[in-house]
Structures are given as C-alpha cells and as structure tokens.
Image (cartoon, coloured by chain):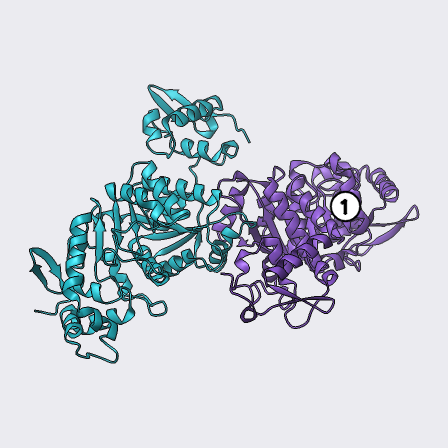
Chain colours: A cyan, B purple
Amino acid sequence: MSATDAGQREEWRGLEVTERMRLSLIVEPGDLRVREALDRYGAAALLAACVGGDPLDEGVPKPSWVRRATELDRLTQSALDAAERTGLRWVQPGDAEWPSGLAVLDNAEPLSSVGGAPLGLWARGPLDLADGVARSVAIVGARNATTYGNQAAGDLAAEVAVEDHTVISGGAFGIDVAAHRGALAVRKPTICVLACGADVAYPRAHGNILARIADGGLVLSEQAPGETPTRGRFLTRNRIIAALAQGTVVVEAARRSGALNTVNWAQRCGRVAMGVPGPVTSRASVGVHDALRSGGAVLVTRSAEVLEAIGAIGSVDATLPWVAPTGTDRLSVSALRIFERVPAAASATTDAIASAVPCRPEEVRLALGALSAAGFVVAEGDGWRALRPERRADLS
Amino acid sequence: MSATDAGQREEWRGLEVTERMRLSLIVEPGDLRVREALDRYGAAALLAACVGGDPLDEGVPKPSWVRRATELDRLTQSALDAAERTGLRWVQPGDAEWPSGLAVLDNAEPLSSVGGAPLGLWARGPLDLADGVARSVAIVGARNATTYGNQAAGDLAAEVAVEDHTVISGGAFGIDVAAHRGALAVRKPTICVLACGADVAYPRAHGNILARIADGGLVLSEQAPGETPTRGRFLTRNRIIAALAQGTVVVEAARRSGALNTVNWAQRCGRVAMGVPGPVTSRASVGVHDALRSGGAVLVTRSAEVLEAIGAIGSVDATLPWVAPTGTDRLSVSALRIFERVPAAASATTDAIASAVPCRPEEVRLALGALSAAGFVVAEGDGWRALRPERRADLS
C-alpha cells in the first residue's frame, strides 16, 4: 500500500474502508501524537505499525493504539454495521465533500496535547459538508444559559441562516441547541458536531432535535459510531467546530466555560472570534465580557455585524442603513429589523420582506402597518417602500 | 488693567469680581470664539472691546456680546446677588481649587463651534474642586434608562466612590441621577455639572437630590446664576464633565444619545472612555455597543475595571483575585464582591469588610455566613478569612 496522506482505500466485506478510518478506530481522535506520526509516516505506515506493534518513534505507536489494533477487525466491523444501520458515511481528505478549512488545524498551535485535523468524520444527513460550511457561523455558549442568552442565540442563528450561512454548534443544552433551533425555525440546514459517536443521542433529551438536524443538515463526529462522550472529547470536538466555521460567536459563558475553549480554538485557527454581550449583573455573561475585554473577541449584537466580521463583504453592511439616524431610535428591535429590509428604491411585497426576517408573516404584516402609520414606509403597488428621511417627519 | 490670562480682580460694591466672571455673563460660555479671542487678547482687552463695542477681529466681539455688555453692571449685580443668596462661589484659573485638568479643553479638538476651557465655574458646596476631581470618574447615560441601567450605574458609582473616587455626572433623570445616588448611598461626595445656573433646580424634580449633592460635594456650572438650560448648553456642559473626570463611563445610551457626546468629549480630551454593555435586545444599550464596537470606548463591567482603565494602578487589580478561578463561578455577583474583600492572609471583621462594599452590613453578614457554609471563608477570631483553593472543595 502506498503511504499517501489520504491513505489507501480498500473493499472490506463489500464496504469501502480506508486506513484513516481504521486508524481513527484505534487511536484517540485529536491526540496530537497522531498528527505528528501522520505527518512523518503517513496513514499506511502508522496503521501497519499499530497492527504490528513496531515502534516508529519515541512512544509511537502508543501502547493503547497497539492494544486496540489487535481488535481492528471487530472494531471495523462494528463501526460499519452501526454506520449502515444509522445511515452514517465516512468523509476524509481527498473526498469531494471534505472541507479544505479543516487543514488549518494541522498548523494551528495545539492546546495542551490536542490538535491536528481529524482523520476523517462520520457524517449523518443529506447536506454536502464542503458546501455546508463554505458560508458558516458557529454559535456556541453556556449549557446553563439564561432566557436572554437562549433568545439572543436563537435570533442570531435565525438571522444568519436567513442570510444563507450555515449555523454550526455542538448540540448541547442551552445556547447550542437554541442556535440549532433558530436555524431550523427558518427552515435552513444546521450542522451539529458531537463529542460522541454521530449515531449517539447525547444529551439523551436531544434525540429528536438531533434527528431533525440530520434530516436537512448534518450531524458529525470524529469519534467512532457508538462512542460515548468524555470531558476530553468535548474539548477536542470544539476544535472541529471552530475550524469548520468562518467565525465563532459565543453567547453567554461563565468564567472558565467550555464555550471559551471553542473561542480559543477559533483564534488558534485564525478564524474570527466574536462575543454577544449581556447584562454585567449576569454571571452567564462574565466569560464573554472577559473575552471581549481581552481583545480576543469582537463584540457583536446582530447578524449583520457577524457577517461583516467574517468578511461576507458586500452581502451586508453592519452599519445601519442611511435611514437609521433619523427617528428609527424609536423602533423596537424587531420593527427595526423589518424596516431595514424594506427597500427605498423600489417596493417589496410583504412576503418578500417576511422571507428576509426571522418573524412570522403576521408579525411582519402588523409591523409594516405600524411603520406605515409612523411614516417610515409607504404602501406602493402591492408592496412597501421605505421613505427617505427628508420625505418624512424627523421623529427624533 | 493688565491683560494676564487670568484677568484682573477688583472689588465691586464690596464683592470680588473678575474680568473672566464679567465676560462669562455677556458671552455664551463654551463659544469657541471666546477661547480664540481670549488666547489672542486676554480677558481684559476682550471685556473692554465688548464694553466699548470696538472690533478686535473678524466678528469679535460678536454683536450679542456687545449688546449684553451694555447691561454689564445689572448682570453682574444680579449674579452676585444670586450667588450671595444661594451660596455660590466663583472659581477661575489661578484660584487654588481650579482643576488643572480643565486646561485640556483649550487644546482639545472642538466639536462644531463648541470648545475651550470655561472662563470659570460657579460652585455650590463644601468640596474643594481641585481635590474633588483629582481622583474621579464620570458616570453618564440615558435619561430614558432601564431598571438594569439604573442599577448598574448606581452599583458602579457606589463602588468607585467606596474606592475614594469622586463620581461626576450631570444630574439628569435616569443614569445621571442613579450615579449621584449611588455615591450618596455610601456617604461619599459627588459632583454635578449643570447646563443651567448652579442655583437652578433642573430638572425641577431633582431639587432635593441637588441640595443633597451640594451638602457634601459640589454643584457646578459655567452658566450665570439663574440661567436656564438649552439643548446647546447640555452639549457644552458635557465637555466640562469629560474634562474634569479621569475617565467617563457611559451606562446605557440609545443611538445618538447625548451621553455619547460626553464620551466623544472624553476622547477629545485624551481621557479614558468606557462603556457598560447590556442586553443586545435593549435599545437603551445600542449606543453603548456602537461605541464599544468602534473601539472608541473600553468595555467595563465592574469598578475594578474602571479604576484600572483610568490608571489607578496598584490601588486595584481588575483581574479577579487568585481564588476566583475555583468555585466562585457559583457565587452571586454581590457575594463575589464581598468575597473579594475577605483577606486570605489575616482575618477581617464583618464591619471592616462591610466598609469596603456598597452593601448594608446585614447583607454582608448574611453573605459571609453563606460563604462560610459554602467553604469559601472561615470564621477566625472576631472576623473572617478567605480559604485558599487547595484548602477547600473545588465546587466547579
């Protein structure tokens, strides 16, 4: 077998199996030593060394890898059985849908003994991974989130999803699941990266939401099917979320929250790290405020600011439209969001405007009526047009 | 009379009157032209030109100054009468209590046609102005503040006041008065700079609080006694607040709020501009978040961060004490504040600890009991001592 980085592919009891897949079943994914050995010897030689128990290098292969390699056939078979049963596919470097962005992890400064791009990912769901992450934002945060945090995460996720950016998160309680739900609420695909097997419902209570995510998006993991999560695996998982997304937004994190570890990884990967502020009286925002004060993260309050920060230039302008300085101070945040979607040049229909905001059409219809009454917009043809400031009373 | 910058002093019907005082009665304080003419000709020549109606320069003296100069004696007498009646004193450059910091306004970039140090200030209250502002923080913000904003402003004011920094604000509804009240609550002097005469109760509803401020601190104005506030005068007044304080903290400001004008002046004066974040769903915080995003202001969440930002080095360390990383995540913000005041080396009495936090002694006593039950502090002698992390269970 040639020791290309991608490693050899082979048929095995009628299923495609790769050296990287097999390696991932016997090493601990995210172990820095794997990346180093892979760089130096390639997948084929490393796998052979594990199977043969031949030392390649100081402490490589690790005894635990060699021990697990003695069960390689059983591990492979059970992984393939689970994959077949639960509809998982294996994606790895060289595959069309492998995201080039993950390579950044091979050069990113490791965190303790964790680092390196995953050997591959088990994926569940119809979304093409490379396409799905091409325009994407990770939204992560505290499990023990507040009502405010959950709402902010859900709104932000819905807004970036409406702008056709995929929301990536970790499927945990609190901010993570609020972000996934926000994207699903506007019928957009979302990606969940798990610390356990991609076929495992963890947390148990999220079985249904994980299934919904897999229906239109992706559930991913570098862990073998059936594997359970450990504290360590949450931390190694975080590097994948940070590397897949163009930027990572943390919404609520207590001091020392795991969500800050994902922000740390985003910075190591050269991705944009962002934070949503909250009340200074809320412990759930202390970690975010620390990250914002340290200069490590950019303060963001709305989707336009997030998209601007990740360089989705032209597509958005985070500064409020030229109409904002006049009167719009009086508008509610949601009314302002809707108003921002009403064009000034031509008119847009209520449905067209509604399709661009994470609100129910009835809400949008009501809001447009109020905006019209307040002189911000005018009915024109079958739609609405924003009035230029000089054309309306300055309400300030 | 010599035309020194300070101008000549004279007895007038038994009261001390200065050329600067008289000038301030006929020009509009804060008018940039006054600063320019003063630089070029000095107070004496400028006053004489106003009285004589002799042009000194292109458009100087302004017709309005000359017009008012014809009433100089009446204006002077009524100012002195009001001053005598309401206990105002006139403070100007050269006086022992004149704060050197105000000179920065003569070099700060003007804002539209406003700029320059005040000719002098009418002052009401026992506090020595120079001493009072030597260690000081301006806390300003929206009139239309939220409960959150008022609480954050009041807590922050109480905390910096406890650290013997004078709280300076504008006496307006909302954040301003919450800041004054916070300082008064811990029995510390506070300074209010008004846009009307220092003897005028504006807003009317603040007559009592202004009297309380003047009891132990200072009520200041560059406007003549009896003068009423105008929109323009609020903006010129802001430059004095920003220049007097070592740093300005804005707590809640809608987009285009006047409080942002004070932040702008703080930056022009080379003072530290700071902002307290809030919920992104609150319009009352939009202007603050804009200032924080623009890089013009530093995000602050507690007094220690404010004092660190204004360079009160050594006196404080904004990073939480070494005990914080373990377990204290679980503490309420107020419990954490109290815990931070409990020494680890020796023990401190409840009263000593209470004197260092803006809480009622009963609260402190209760909190210390809870902290003791949770294993953060231990009763020792007649006081309390903080336990080192290794000495207590890691609650995280």
Numbered disc 1: what chain?
B
| Mark 1 Cα shell of 10 Å, populated few (<14), some (14-19), many (≥20) | many
Query: Residue B380 appears in which quarter of the rendering?
Result: bottom right
Q: Which residue is mark 1?
A: B23
Residue B376: x and y, percent?
Answer: 60, 63
Q: Outermost residue, right direction?
A: B14
> Up-down: is A289 above or below B282?
below
**Residue at figure coordinates x 55%, y 50% from the top left:** A280
Residue B49: x and y, percent?
Answer: 75, 45
**Total residue callouts:** 1
Observer-nearest of A251 and B153: A251
Residue A123: x and y, percent?
Answer: 22, 51
> Up-down: is B26 above or below A255?
above
Observer-nearest of A161 and A222: A222
The answer to whether one can see residue B119 in this image is no
The answer to whether one can see residue B80 in this image is yes
Report whether B76 appears left or right of A31.
Answer: right
Quadrant occupied by the N terminus of chain A: bottom left
Residue B304: x and y, percent?
Answer: 61, 60
Observer-nearest of B146 and B47: B146
Report whether B7 appears left or right of B161.
Answer: right
Describe the element under mark 1 as helix, strand or loop: helix
- Residue type at mark 1 is Leu
Quadrant occupied by the C terminus of chain A: top right
Report whether B246 appears left or right of B196.
Answer: left
